Amino acid sequence: MYKIAYLTLFVILTSCGSCFTSSEKAIIYQSPDSPARVLKINHKEDSLIVRKPSKRIKKIHNNKDLEQLIKKLYLTMLEENGVGIAAPQIGVNRNVFLFYRLDKEEKTVEVAINPRIISHSTELLCFQNDGCLSVPNRYGTSQRYAWIEVEYTDQNEKKVTHKFLGGSRAEDYTGTIFQHEFDHLQGKLYIDKLCKPN
């Protein structure tokens, strides 16, 4: 009898439900059909959140909180005219971001849940005019891999493995966008990777 009670208590305590905290849910559901406020590094409290590494999303299937977070990110990215946005930028330190697929003819927006860079070039590029919604009114040249091979789960819960190219703004730079957003999940910003082009 005691074993069953302890087992039940253990399952309740260790199950994560949707795995979002109450403060994260407050952000996700605040004005559900409106964009979120983008955190800026020139505000101390914002900077502490943006600089914090994110946590893996444990439950993807049938997670209404995750679906609403993705919607919120999409609305915010459109409002801010960005080519990508990561959850930490709106105050939710979870491993998910949105990015434009410039490598596709229709230039679709894709969701990357629990992304990983599994391989990359040894060659590094200096990507010019890198900017960030969380770093207002600044642009710089950031060091990026020429190509990356990645794994992630997309918005349809499909596992994706893909090789993206870096490049310049005149070419396909989907790989650079992916690296930029992936860095956000590690608590890093493009200003941490500045370089001088040849």
Image (cartoon, helix red, strand yellow):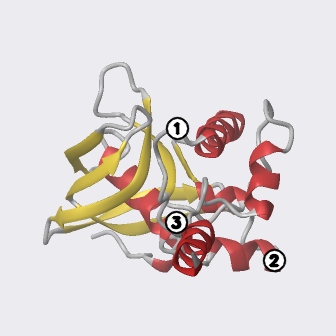
**Could you tell me which secondary element the residue under label 2 belongs to?**
helix
Residue 126 falls in image quadrant = bottom left
Q: Position of residue 194 (x, y in %)?
A: 44, 75
Tell me what residue is drawn at x 64 percent, y 35 percent: 71
For disc 3, the marked residue is 184
Residue nearer the viewer, 99 or 57: 57
**Could you tell me which secondary element the residue under label 1 belongs to?**
loop
Residue nearer the viewer, 36 or 30: 30
Q: Amino acid at mark 3?
A: His
Identify the mark nearer the N-term, 2 or 1: 2
Q: Position of residue 2 (x, y in %)?
A: 58, 80
Structural crowding at the residue carrying mark 1, measured as other residues with C-alpha within 10 Å and reported as few (<14), some (14–19) or many (≥20)? few
Q: On the rendered structure, is 51 left or right of 118?
A: right
Residue that protrudes farthest toward the top in the picture: 106
Which label number is shown at residue 125?
A: none
Q: On the rendered structure, is 183 left or right of 126?
A: right
Tell me what residue is drawn at x 32 percent, y 50 percent: 152
Identify the mark nearer the N-term, 3 or 1: 1
- The quadrant in which the C terminus is found is bottom left
How many angstroms separate mark 2 from mark 3 (CA)? 16 Å
Q: On the rendered structure, is 194 left or right of 64?
A: left
Q: Amino acid at mark 1?
A: Asn
For disc 2, the marked residue is 45
How many angstroms separate mark 2 from mark 1 (CA)? 32 Å
Mark 3 near mark 1, Cβ–Cβ under 8 Å?
Answer: no
For disc 1, the marked residue is 62
Q: Position of residue 30 (x, y in %)?
A: 85, 44
Q: Is residue 128 above or below residue 122?
A: above
Q: Amino acid at mark 2?
A: Glu
Structural crowding at the residue carrying mark 3, measured as other residues with C-alpha within 10 Å and reported as few (<14), some (14–19) or many (≥20)? many
